[in-house]
């Protein structure tokens, strides 16, 4: 298994308290069994649920927000590589001290 970080861009979708962000995946990654191809994505946060979508793909998954000790300078997407696929693990939100921890794939999918 190999761990790496993908640099991403993030822009707040609205004023303070926004729950939607945009980022760019430089490589394909899997979220809850759905492969997200490289490209631009929107992340919408609604409590403990996250929707990651673009014009062609949308996936809902459980996630939790954790606070770090300091703000992240830039947004990064952390993935864990296994069997030639990269599984999205967390999204660190640039300009904030928050990161989204994406739940592992569920068996009921």
Image (cartoon, rainbow, N blue to C red):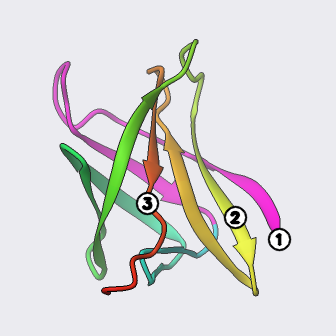
Q: What is the C-alpha distance between the residues marked 3 and 1? A: 18 Å
> Circle 3: is it few (<14), some (14-19), or many (20+) Cα within 10 Å?
some
The residue at 59%/70% (across/down) is 87
- Chain part drawn in magenta: 1-26
* Lower position in the chain sequence, tag 2 or tag 3: 2
Labels 2 and 3 touching (C-beta < 8 A)? no
- Disc number placed over residue 80 in the picture, else none: 2
Q: What is the C-alpha distance between the residues marked 2 and 1? A: 7 Å
The residue at 48%/20% (across/down) is 97
In the image, residue 84 lies at what x, y percent? 75, 85
Where the N terminus falls, by quadrant? bottom right
- Looking at the rendered structure, the secondary structure element under dot 3 is loop
The residue at 50%/56% (across/down) is 24
* Lower position in the chain sequence, tag 2 or tag 1: 1
> Circle 1: is it few (<14), some (14-19), or many (20+) Cα within 10 Å?
few
- Disc number placed over residue 103 in the picture, else none: 3
* Lower position in the chain sequence, tag 3 or tag 1: 1
Outermost front residue: 107
In the image, residue 38 lies at what x, y percent? 54, 72
When asked about the image quadrant of residue 85, the answer is bottom right
The residue at 42%/62% (across/down) is 40
Q: Does the magenta stretch include residue 79?
A: no
- Disc number placed over residue 1 in the picture, else none: 1
Above or below, 83 against 16 in this view is: below
Depth check, front residue: 41 or 34: 34
**Foreground mark, 2 or 3?**
3
Q: Is residue 2 magenta?
A: yes
Labels 2 and 1 touching (C-beta < 8 A)? yes
Where the C terminus falls, by quadrant? bottom left
Outermost top residue: 70
Above or below, 99 against 51 in this view is: above
- Looking at the rendered structure, the secondary structure element under dot 2 is strand
């Amino acid at each position: 298994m190999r761990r790496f970080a993908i640099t991403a861009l993030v822009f707040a979708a609205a004023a303070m308290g926004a729950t939607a962000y945009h980022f760019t995946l430089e490589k394909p990654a899997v979220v809850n069994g759905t492969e997200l191809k490289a490209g631009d994505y929107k992340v919408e946060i609604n409590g403990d649920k996250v929707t990651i979508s673009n014009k062609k793909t949308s996936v809902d998954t459980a996630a939790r927000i954790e606070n770090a000790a300091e703000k992240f300078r830039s947004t990064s997407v952390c993935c864990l590589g296994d069997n030639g696929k990269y599984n999205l693990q967390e999204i660190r939100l640039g300009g904030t001290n928050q990161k989204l921890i994406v739940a592992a794939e569920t068996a009921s999918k």
